[in-house]
Amino acid sequence: MTFTHITPESPRCLIESLVSGTPIVGYASKYVEELTEHQGGGAVVPVHDWQKLGELIAALYHDRPRLAQLIQAAGTNGSRFNDEAVFQERSQIIKKHLI
């Protein structure tokens, strides 16, 4: 999933992406890092650096083994989410960043 979100809130679509076994490819944020830090499933570049994002997408297109690894990691990572777990995780992250 190409992710070009630049505002600080945490979009739910990232969890849905991982649950679907779809890697998060896009701009870095604390939320993306926290979702992918243990099991992987993401590849990010600095926010607003559209040139690096384009290069990353092109690199993944040409590096199928790396893309396959990201897909596997996203699916593994996403398997930990269910309705209750998603609510708990989002609540903890939101509380952490509101303080």
Image: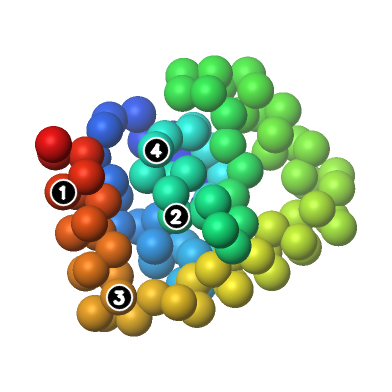
**Residue at mark 1:** 95
User: From where the camera sits, is residue 41 visible?
Assistant: no
Q: Which mark sits nearer the N-terminus, 2 or 3?
A: 2
**Residue at mark 2:** 35
- Mark 4 crowd level (few <14, some 14–19, many ≥20, 10 Å Cα): few
**Residue at disc 1, secondary structure:** helix
Pinpoint residue 68: horizontal percent, then vertical percent.
Answer: 77, 63
Q: Which mark sits nearer the N-terminus, 1 or 3?
A: 3
Q: Residue at x 61, y 57 (%)?
A: 40
Q: Which mark sits nearer the N-terminus, 3 or 4?
A: 4
The residues bearing labels 2 and 1 have C-alpha atoms spaced at a distance of 15 Å
Pinpoint residue 21: horizontal percent, then vertical percent.
Answer: 57, 70
- Mark 1 crowd level (few <14, some 14–19, many ≥20, 10 Å Cα): few
Q: In the image, what residue type sits under mark 3? A: Ala
Q: In the image, what residue type sits under mark 2? A: Leu
User: 7 or 57: nearer the eye?
Assistant: 7
